[in-house]
Image (cartoon, grey):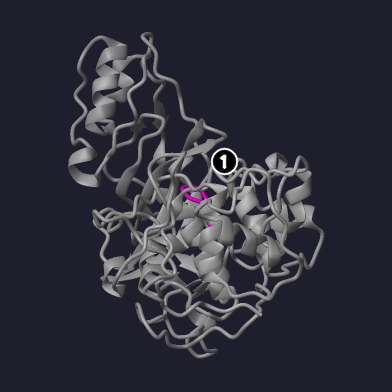
Amino acid sequence: MSSVRPWSSTGAVLLALGVTSSAIAPFIVSAPAAAANFTDTSSHWARPFIETLAERQIIAGFPDRTFKPDAPVTRAQFAAIVKNAFSNNTVRVSRGFADVPSSYWAAPAIGKAYETGFMSGYPDGAFKPEQQIPKVQVLVALSSGLNFTPTRAADTTLTSFRDSGEIPAYAKGGVAAAAERNVVVNYPNVSFLNPNETATRADVAAYIYQTLVNQGKLPPIATSEGANNYIARLNGTAPTTGTTPTTPTTGSTPTPTPTSTALNPRYLVPQGTPVNIRYLGSQKIVVTPGETINNLALRVVDDLKNAQGQVVVPKDSEIVGQLIPVSSNGQILGTQFIAQRVSIDNKSYPFSARSQVVTGQPVTQNTNPGTLKDAATSAATSAVLATILGQKLDLGNILSSVTGGQPAPQTPTTPNLIVIDPSADLRLVVSNDFYANP
């Protein structure tokens, strides 16, 4: 039986425990308050996971009050996190690893992670503590240590991920079991697991948080949080190993468990409902691969109705979300619109819907500049357009001044651009049942 460890002034383990690979040591905070106010997470996608775990003293930050959410996690660091987050019984006798001397800072945590069934070594007897841990190993470790098993064929569950073919055979059962329990959190695209990419501090915080939710040790994050868009919720009810608390002891008050009255079918737009949209800013949107556009506003073209034909979301309602890059194994595949909120009669609701992955039309030196006149774009993309076409275009409003376009990383060659026809390319499909209770 696992549980959330109570706070100890000597027990808060830093999620990424050092700067150099040769001499990493845990950072011990001397007071609970030191864990809570990070200077680099306020606008990060994983903020609600990180903040609550920090408040519970399950994770901590650096002396400069940063958390460094995008930094990688090593196998030794993950062992320390597991030791701090869970109190499981021993299931096997501890063994030594050739590359983990007793003087190594994480030796006790590695031993505990092995004894409790979370982690194992390699066939050659090594543990490889300094090796960065991929996402797939984190998910398998959590399923192994907590005895999560799939309730149906793993391959059936894993078809929910568009890159399921990249999951190693040994890991399919563990990943499927974690996915069934809503442990999997995929940023920036919930449909892509990117299983072999190194897990970041933010990824691990999200996985640990969702695991504790499944165990009934933490409340789900509030439905108003954008991070909900990245939780891979599969059809059906997630198996649980505990009872979800209705009130937390610290952190934000969770959304009450919906009752039959709250989830009134009169106000339901079911998962899978198509949503036709239009963009009022222009007929075209141009982005650079790797670029994120925040707070992009679209309009609903047709009324969204419930099963009885009653209007739930009227046409012309505003949907706000992000255009985000979609990548797999480091290769950018295109861009995708992820809806976050919808406004109905001046009231804003969390709304989960997404477009297809858009590869768009290429822009070359032979592109007719007239076809891009008045296109909506960011300042960064506008500069790239001018380079490709050899002239500046009359682009009207620049998205970066309105929607927070973030330029893609600079590359030695001019990047290809993605030209989007919003009405055709950004049609949405509702990702989760939506209730618009008045």
Q: Is residue 224 visible?
A: no
Residue nearest the viewer, comparing 407 with 134: 134
What residue occupies the far front of the structure in this picture? 103
Chief secondary structure of the magenta span?
Answer: loop
Q: Where is residue 259 drawn, in percent x and y?
A: 52, 89
Residue annotated with mark 1: 131
Which residue is pictured at 69% across the width and 39% down the height? 166
For this view, does 232 lie left or right of residue 348? right
Q: Where is residue 199 drawn, in percent x and y?
A: 52, 47
- Specify the amino acid type for callout 1: Gln
Question: Dividing the image into 4 quarters, which one contains the N terminus?
Answer: bottom right
Question: Dividing the image into 4 quarters, which one contains the C terminus?
Answer: bottom left
For the record, the magenta segment spans: 185-190
Where disc 1 sits, the SS reads: loop
Q: Is residue 125 magenta?
A: no
Q: Where is residue 161 drawn, in percent x and y?
A: 64, 49
Residue nearest the viewer, comparing 173 with 415: 173
Q: Compared with residue 116, is residue 414 higher up or lower down, i.e. above or below?
A: above
Badge 1 density bin: few <14, some 14–19, many ≥20, Cα 10 Å: some
Q: How many marks?
A: 1
Residue nearest the viewer, comparing 246 with 5: 5
Q: Is residue 186 magenta?
A: yes
Q: Compared with residue 63, is residue 22 higher up or lower down, i.e. above or below?
A: above
Q: Is residue 27 visible?
A: yes
